[in-house]
Image: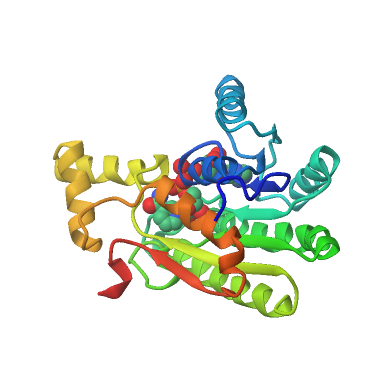
């Protein structure tokens, strides 16, 4: 793999203002891709992210604030990517949210939001990105599923259902485009210490009246045999590999990077 083999290509990374999405955006930029950022956050901080990315990796970036739970805003995001860079070569469906409660206590509006953002948004972005990719007979679609797309955890019904569904969408997208240069694969991380997981660390520390560090260790000890968090940089390296020619025959896989979680 050449260092800048993605130069001239455009990557749209949804939910790339923090956490895993930001890590993947940086890895793709390091390989030369121009980046369309998306996600919520403080406008000054987002500008700083763009500036750092452009200066560090000598690529172009753009940002569009679309709520991935809304089909009309997703359409506007894709139109923005098209107007700014002429389309999308690499689509990383990363935006995601989570809520923790037993099924009988699970608010219906939380269920709807999780399915909309973690699953339905990926259907919309995929169908809108495919025409650009088909024009060039090249494309990479990378779906951020989760180890929860492979195994379940109690109290995460909507998240588990959405991530299992996303792996189904990944396989179908891969099959429908099997005889083209467009691949679609899913990445299934275990615990990654991002703002999304920090909330669960905080809840655990409060529940058990333990320190933040002890709560992190407890969460890892329960599920992730390596005892270490996966990092956004490691996930970024896998995303870059999926974009390479060496990975052109990897199609429809759900590749876990989970410290051994799903092997148990
Ligand atoms: P995060 O909370 O750090 O970042 C989520 C990103 O999505 C942010 O940029 C946020 O602004 C954006 N976002 C949230 N709702 C949105 C909406 N409605 N519209 C547009 N953007 C929205 O989360 P993360 O941990 O980096 O998670 C990223 C992805 O990886 C998610 O799909 C998550 O399910 C998945 N994942 C995370 C972990 C983990 O341990 N952190 C593990 C497995 C899978």
Q: How many marks?
A: 0
Residue 65, position as x, y percentages in the image:
68, 36
| Image side of residue 192 versus residue 223, left or right | right
Which quadrant would the N terminus be assigned to in this image? bottom right
Q: Residue furthest front?
A: 2
Residue 142, x across and y down, in percent: 59, 60
* Left/right of residue 25 with respect to residue 218 in the rendered view: right
**Image quarter for residue 171?**
bottom right
Q: Is residue 207 visible?
A: no
Asked whether, in this view, residue 26 is left or right of residue 77, the answer is left
What's the colour scheme? rainbow
Residue closest to the eye, 14 or 142: 142
Query: Which residue is rendered at x = 63% and y = 50% of the image?
Result: 5
| Residue at the (56%, 62%) spot, across then down | 242
Q: Residue at x 72, y 69 (%)?
A: 181
| Quarter of the figure that contains the C terminus | bottom left
Is residue 79 among what the camera can see?
A: yes
Residue 147 at x, y = what percent?
Answer: 39, 65
Q: Is residue 216 left or right of residue 12?
A: left
Q: Is residue 181 above or below residue 70?
A: below
The residue depicted at 65 percent of the width and 50 percent of the height is 69
């Amino acid at each position: 793999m050449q260092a800048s083999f993605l130069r001239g290509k455009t990557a749209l990374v949804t939910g790339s203002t923090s956490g895993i999405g930001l890590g993947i955006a940086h890895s793709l930029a390091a390989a030369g891709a121009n980046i369309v950022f998306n996600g919520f956050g403080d406008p000054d901080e987002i500008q700083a992210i763009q500036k750092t990315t452009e200066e560090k990796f000598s690529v172009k970036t753009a940002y569009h604030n679309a709520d991935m739970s809304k089909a009309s805003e997703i359409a506007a995001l894709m139109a923005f990517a098209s107007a700014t860079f002429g389309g999308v070569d690499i689509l990383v469906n990363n935006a995601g949210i989570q809520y923790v409660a037993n099924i009988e206590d699970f608010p219906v509006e939380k269920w709807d939001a999780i399915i909309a953002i973690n699953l339905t948004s990926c259907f919309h972005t995929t169908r809108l990105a495919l025409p650009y990719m088909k024009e060039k007979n090249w494309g990479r679609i990378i779906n951020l599923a989760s180890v929860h797309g492979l195994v379940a955890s109690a109290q995460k019904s909507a998240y588990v259902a959405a991530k299992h569904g996303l792996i189904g969408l990944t396989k179908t997208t891969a099959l429908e485009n099997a005889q083209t240069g467009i691949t679609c694969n899913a990445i299934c991380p275990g615990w990654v210490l991002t703002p999304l997981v920090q909330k669960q660390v905080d809840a655990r520390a409060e529940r058990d009246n333990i320190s933040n560090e002890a709560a992190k260790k407890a969460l890892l000890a329960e599920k992730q045999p390596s005892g270490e968090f996966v990092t956004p940089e490691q996930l970024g390296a896998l995303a870059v590999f999926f974009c390479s020619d060496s990975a052109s025959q990897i199609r429809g896989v759900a590749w876990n990077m989970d410290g051994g979680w799903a092997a148990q």
